[in-house]
């Protein structure tokens, strides 16, 4: 298993990647677009892009992922994709009849320089139907950037300030998280008794129930009138600098809705910050139910601290999720020693390093890294636990490490997309995952005489 | 339930007229009394929700990806490498685990500046890194969409890397926009494998007289290993497999085989044809899916070699394999029989699995291919009639000549002709011939048609891929992935058929289907009870 990965870390000549920890923008854009009610994402490029993104998203969510493609041929690549996009728009509304079509670009259409606004402007879009777009060049950033760009595209296209006074409502941009997380954030907002607009919101779309009937456009997703109304909200909470901040800032600029970028609310501290921000925005008090949940979480953390305290962790994944999870690991008394994201951006390194400094720790930290390097770090400084997406399982096997799957994509386990890692409840779930992984491991490794009933 | 032409026409009415015209030519209701043709390997209409992928997927993802002892460098932005990394279940093992590179994914991860200023230098640097980290005997460079557009000369990079390191560096101009589906990529990959790898080895003769290559077998779920086990038991020498669990080292000597077996006709028939022209190796269309098909294939192979000891050993192994599964299929058939299926897969399984379904008592009422050509439907005899359109013209057709030193007729011409009358030697009759009258054949089945045909036929099981699996299951119909086998397998051969039967019957038998309707729906909610003495 990964037998060619050496402990020696050689300086590589290229900035190419060996075992990437990121993928390309369009898949993130496709996922974000699924978070609009009755929206069909459209991939403006070759068929393969659309096919690959649908494949990966379907495997992660185990639910239908619908999207159309401009089906570029060589001719379209030479002469431009305008005719393909126009035909796509006509066919999509005639055959599939969504309310909205969210077009994202690919490295192909970006390289040939297709001008989306003018192509869409020149297309026959049926009355009451909407086509909007986001530029998502695959040769920049990562899938998280694509999610961010599509979310920002929603603001640019829909958000409008129509009222003199801002309404008593907040916009919440959850970032690139699972529908289970979005549901949990909404549950917290409901408990806090504040009116909110969440966008994008993939709950009810990619975690749709089994009813015996297939519905191409399920009930979930942010409604268009709500997307427009985001311009009238009194504040935006954008969760995660990488996936959500750009949309929040665009909304601030466009509609003067103050934006507050917070860490994704994973762990006790980040969830506290979210609640505190809601209080500052004007929610009057924290309901007893939520306070009780928090108390339960802290109770669990304290009661089980000896399961994980001081254990060394290697963690990789998307920046927003990794930042908050790392912070939670520190809150649990664990020791992150390798922290890596595939998404480029030095703010990740700065944020993690500051966190570690504060805890008096040092670690390997990198943005834009790959899993070959990550694995080599682990070989040089072994850890007790690995946290990451499914791709981590090869390293886990090679180094005989327990792995807990957090992030995108998770292709080899199920139910993960339904259950939250955010909020106090989500934090309980992470504690359970971490504890169980370590204890299962201890059980597996124990000698007969040390194998214990109570732990 | 059958479908009339009128009903089909009505179903297609939702399409804009141009789309309708196009789609109509890709759908046929089988009628054995007529000479029927079907349109295939033409463009998918933009905006249609298709299952098709691209040339890159066919080249790197399908044909090259499984070659285990090569480092496959994907030249482009990160995505294409990422999505073809471990996603296809092409299993492989090597004696020295360090010679298996399949768990490594290498990409130039092109950035905006590379698009603007060109990515050749970066590609060369990645090759340097790969040589330093892995020191492979051979490397592939595959192009993603932007490469052809910005004009990176991968051939020049490959050449200078070969000079620098003395290893084989092969480049494939398989940009995603080429052709109309994965099929273009198969062809591009086939050309280079014949041109640059096969025949590079020094072997002049195989180790034994029953030497074969297994073409178009990708070892999904271990199918190839199960086939090889049976072939080895009979006494065949498998020189190389293209490409499941295949290797550059084995491929180099593929020219020494006496016969090429073609499992997936669509993805590999170019190699089979070229090897026949270049080295004189005939090819046999085989099918190791289904018990009857496997037996027929094994007997055809024995007939080709024609020696009594081989024929006897073949029968002995068939009997042994059958005895080992005897009676075991029955328990599953109790569940599976008298059911109907849709069978829509890539380029050969849409055909192959119909036989296995039939053995389980499941009738295929609709079938099709995602990226096949007309010959996969109608048989190779239509090849001369297939008109070459602009999209096919862009894929170079490699012309090979008989190798002056190595061309050797494997069997005398007369025998060849005699055999041709009995076994599918260098011949494939296509899927349509095996389908019953009234069944529907659909090329490049799309989402709308999937939904509509399901409403009409109400099949009991839908065999397809991951993108429509959950669509179908939401309707309460079991969906069986026949690309990835739902992470199960092997399904090939005798024991594989048993695995398939177990999995398919499980998909019918799972109690989970019983819970779809909540108990409070459809039942009276007022639960009146008359108490004693109340009357």
Image (cartoon, grey):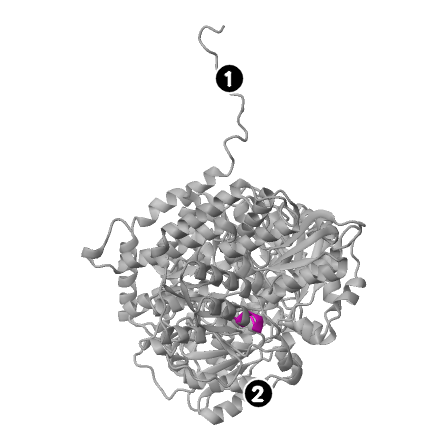
Residue A346: say if magenta. Answer: yes
* Residue A33 found in image quarter: bottom right
SS for callout 2: helix
Residue placed furthest toward the left: A449
Q: Which residues are magenta?
A: A341-349
Q: Residue at x 52, y 44 (%)?
A: A290
> Camera-side residue: B448 or A11?
A11
Task: Where is residue A202? Give x, y as percent.
Answer: 60, 52
Residue B439 makes an appearance in the image: no
- Is residue A129 positioned above or below B207 on the image? above
The CA span between labels 1 and 2 is 82 Å
Residue B121, numbered label:
2
Q: In front: B140, or B274? A: B140
Task: State the image coordinates of residue B290 (x, y, percent, origin top left).
Answer: 40, 57
Residue B528 - label: 1
Q: Position of residue B158 (x, y in %)?
A: 52, 87
Q: Which x, y percent locates residue B211?
A: 34, 76
Residue furthest toward the bottom? Answer: B163
Q: Nearer the viewer, residue B520 or B226?
A: B520
């Amino acid at each position: 298993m990964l037998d060619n990965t050496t402990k020696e870390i050689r300086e590589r000549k290229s900035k190419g990647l060996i075992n990437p920890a990121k993928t390309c923008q369009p898949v993130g854009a496709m996922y974000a677009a699924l978070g609009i009610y009755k929206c069909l994402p459209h991939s403006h490029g070759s068929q393969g892009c659309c096919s690959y993104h649908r494949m990966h998203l379907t495997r992660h969510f185990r639910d239908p992922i619908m999207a159309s493609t401009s089906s570029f041929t060589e001719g379209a690549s030479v002469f431009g994709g305008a005719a393909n996009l126009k035909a796509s728009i006509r066919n999509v509304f005639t055959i599939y009849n969504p309310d909205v079509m969210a077009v994202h670009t690919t490295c192909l259409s970006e390289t040939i320089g297709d001008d989306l606004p003018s192509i869409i402007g020149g297309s026959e879009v049926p009355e009451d139907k909407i086509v909007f777009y986001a530029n998502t060049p695959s040769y920049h950033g990562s899938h998280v950037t694509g999610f961010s760009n599509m979310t920002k595209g929603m603001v640019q296209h829909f958000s409008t300030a129509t009222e003199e006074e801002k309404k008593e409502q907040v916009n919440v941009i959850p970032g690139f998280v699972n529908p289970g997380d979005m549901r949990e954030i909404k549950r917290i907002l409901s408990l806090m008794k504040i009116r909110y607009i969440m966008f994008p919101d993939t709950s009810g779309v990619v975690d749709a129930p089994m009813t015996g009937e297939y519905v191409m456009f399920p009930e979930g997703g942010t409604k268009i009138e709500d997307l427009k109304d985001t311009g009238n909200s009194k504040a935006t909470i954008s969760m995660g600098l990488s996936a959500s901040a750009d949309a929040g800032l665009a909304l601030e600029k466009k509609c003067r809705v103050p934006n507050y970028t917070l860490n994704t609310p994973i762990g006790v501290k980040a969830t506290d910050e979210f609640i505190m921000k809601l209080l500052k925005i004007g929610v009057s008090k924290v309901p007893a139910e939520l306070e009780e949940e928090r108390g339960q979480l802290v109770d669990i953390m304290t009661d089980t601290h000896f399961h994980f305290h001081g254990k060394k962790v290697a963690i990789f994944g998307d920046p927003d999720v990794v930042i908050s999870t790392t912070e939670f690991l520190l809150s649990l008394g664990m020791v992150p020693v390798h922290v890596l994201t595939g998404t480029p951006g030095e703010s990740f390194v700065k944020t993690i390093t500051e966190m570690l400094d504060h805890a008096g720790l040092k670690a390997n930290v990198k943005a834009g890294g790959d899993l070959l390097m990550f694995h080599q770090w682990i070989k040089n400084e072994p850890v007790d636990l690995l946290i990451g997406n499914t791709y981590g399982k090869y390293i886990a096997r090679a180094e005989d490490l327990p792995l807990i799957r957090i992030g995108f994509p998770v292709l080899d386990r199920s139910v993960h997309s339904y259950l939250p890692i955010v909020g106090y409840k989500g934090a309980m779930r992470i504690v359970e995952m971490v504890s169980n992984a370590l204890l299962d491991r201890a059980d597996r490794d124990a000698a007969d005489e040390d194998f214990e009933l109570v732990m | 339930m059958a479908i009339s032409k009128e009903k089909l026409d009505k179903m297609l009415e939702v399409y804009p007229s141009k789309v309708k015209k196009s789609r109509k030519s890709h759908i046929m209701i089988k009628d054995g009394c007529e000479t029927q043709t079907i349109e295939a390997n033409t463009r998918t209409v933009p905006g249609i929700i298709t299952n098709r992928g691209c040339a890159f997927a066919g080249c790197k993802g399908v044909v090259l990806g499984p070659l285990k002892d090569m480092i496959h460098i994907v030249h482009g932005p990160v995505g294409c490498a990422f999505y073809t990394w471990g996603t296809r279940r092409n299993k492989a093992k090597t004696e020295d685990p360090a010679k298996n590179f399949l768990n490594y994914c290498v990409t130039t991860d092109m950035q905006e500046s590379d698009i603007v200023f060109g990515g050749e230098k970066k590609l060369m640097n990645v090759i340097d890194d790969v040589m330093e980290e892995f020191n492979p005997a051979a490397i592939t460079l595959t192009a993603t969409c932007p490469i052809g557009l910005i004009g990176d000369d991968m051939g020049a990079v490959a050449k200078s890397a070969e000079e620098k390191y003395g290893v084989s560096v092969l480049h494939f101009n398989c940009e995603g926009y080429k052709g109309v589906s994965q099929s273009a990529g198969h062809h591009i990959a086939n050309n280079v494998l014949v041109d640059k790898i096969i025949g590079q080895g020094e072997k002049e003769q195989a180790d034994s007289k029953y030497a074969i290559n297994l073409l178009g077998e990708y070892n999904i779920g271990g199918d190839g290993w199960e086939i090889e086990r049976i072939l080895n038991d009979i006494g065949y020498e498998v020189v190389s497999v293209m490409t499941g669990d295949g290797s550059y080292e084995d491929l180099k000597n593929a020219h020494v085989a006496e016969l090429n077996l073609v499992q997936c006709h669509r993805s590999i028939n170019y190699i089979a044809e070229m090897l026949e022209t270049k080295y004189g190796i005939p090819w046999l269309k085989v099918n190791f899916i289904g018990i009857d098909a496997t037996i027929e294939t094994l007997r055809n192979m024995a007939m080709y070699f024609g020696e009594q000891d081989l024929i006897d050993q073949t029968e002995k192994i068939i009997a042994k394999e059958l005895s080992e599964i005897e009676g075991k299929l029955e328990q599953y058939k109790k569940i599976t029989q008298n059911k109907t299926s849709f069978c829509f897969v890539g380029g050969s399984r849409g055909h192959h699995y119909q036989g296995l379904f039939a053995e389980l008592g499941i009738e295929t009422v609709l079938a099709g291919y995602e990226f096949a050509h007309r010959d996969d439907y109608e048989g190779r005899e239509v090849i001369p009639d297939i008109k070459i359109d602009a999209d096919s013209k862009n894929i170079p057709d490699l012309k090979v000549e008989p190798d002056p030193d190595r061309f050797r007729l494997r069997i005398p011409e007369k025998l060849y002709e005699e055999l041709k009358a009995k076994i599918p030697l260098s011949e494939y009759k296509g899927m349509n011939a095996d389908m019953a009258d009234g069944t529907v054949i659909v090329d490049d089945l799309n989402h709308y048609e999937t939904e509509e045909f399901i409403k009409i036929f109400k099949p009991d099981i839908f065999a397809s891929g991951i993108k429509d699996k959950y669509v179908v299951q939401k309707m309460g119909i079991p969906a069986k992935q026949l690309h990835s086998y739902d992470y199960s397998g092997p399904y090939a051969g005798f024991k594989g058929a048993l695995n398939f039967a177990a999995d398919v019957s499980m998909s019918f038998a799972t109690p989970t289907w019983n819970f779809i309707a909540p108990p409070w729906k459809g039942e009276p909610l007022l639960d009146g009870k008359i108490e004693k003495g109340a009357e």
